Amino acid sequence: METINHKIEKVKEILTGRKIAISFSGGADSTLLAYLAKDVCEDVLLITYDNCIMPSGFLDFARKKASQLGIKHEIIENNFVDISEFVENTSNRCYVCRKLMYSAIKQIANDKSYQIIMDGTNINDLVEDRPGILVNYDENIVSPFIIAKLESDEIHKYLDENNIEYSKATTCLGTRIKTGEKITADKINRISYCEDIIKDIVKSDEIRLREENNIGTIEIKDVENIIDNKKINQIKDQLKPMDYDKLLLNISYDNKQNPIANFTKDSISNKIVFEKDLPYKINLESSYQNLENKNNKFITRYLEDIGFISLEFENKEKITIFKTGKITGHNFNSKESGKNSLINVLTQIRREKIEEKK
């Protein structure tokens, strides 16, 4: 099984000698990509897109980090609260967001003669509900961490072991508002204000305040940091003027990455099996074409009427991909073998685009 360092070297190979632009937020993924690129690329440009609904300090940190890395930095600003397609907050919101962002980033990059645009999308993003990843395919964005099969926990481990600072607050505040409830400037400002207050009281940047039907729910990585009468009373008193009907604390919140899959040993065959329910439907036709065109070492069968693709490897290992988003694996000799095969498949399947009802 490949080590983190082997995967990092693979990323460097992808970057070496190239002139690239990087979509840069200052978060873990884009920071590591920029950090690796600065020493091996011919030329690098960092491009930060500020949609004006990011956590406070987002832009300042991105500027600071780009300066520390000694890499050229461009900033694009566009207030998404003025864009009706975004503020309607449909289930397709993240696709709309990334389409706007990457189209603008691509334009700036191309205007400055950077033809290759890269981002920090990693393997774990492929098992998350992230419809915006479709934009990567539409706009030909290169994701070196996907090619090198780097997972989120490996990225964070490398950053921590090498003392590379990154921002822990780079998710759009629009994600805090329940899908279907309209995004407004007032809601965004209230969430931003409340999160800043809570962060100051509990001394942590890993705070989120989610809104649904005028109820605010606080999520925090380490709950013990907030379970204190003095802190609770401070938060309650300082957030009272914000006019929430209720303020709740989600004690079951877990911000760990969604695991690639659950691997177990079959009691009858004594072989490794796995099952993964992806949070999206799979476009079987485009996935099948992609799998067929990659010269993979397995036999591929596409049963369109039944709704699945079957892959059979030379050693009788099998993976089945269902249009519902379920992926199953059977007859693997080890967890490592099963995981490697699944990751390879995840990089090649394509999700269905969400079609909004009119």
Image: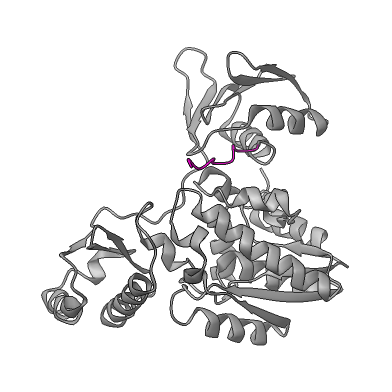
**Which residue occupies 82% across, 69% down?**
110
Residue 97 percent coordinates (x, y): 56, 60
Image position of 202 with respect to 98: above or below = below
Please provide the residue range marked out in magenta. 350-358
Residue 6 percent coordinates (x, y): 72, 54
Residue 263 percent coordinates (x, y): 49, 32
In this view, the residue farthest toward the front is 358
Q: Nearer the viewer, residue 190 or 325?
A: 190
Corner quadrant of residue 165: bottom right
Q: Nearer the viewer, residue 334 or 254?
A: 254
**Which residue occupies 46% across, 71% down?**
169
The answer to whether residue 221 shows anywhere in this view is: yes
In the picture, which quadrant includes the N terminus?
A: top right
Secondary structure that dominates the magenta span:
loop
Residue 51 percent coordinates (x, y): 54, 72
- Looking at the image, residue 129 sits to the left or right of residue 238; the answer is right
Q: Nearer the viewer, residue 13 or 217?
A: 217
- Tell me if residue 126 is in the magenta stretch: no
- Tell me if residue 355 is in the magenta stretch: yes
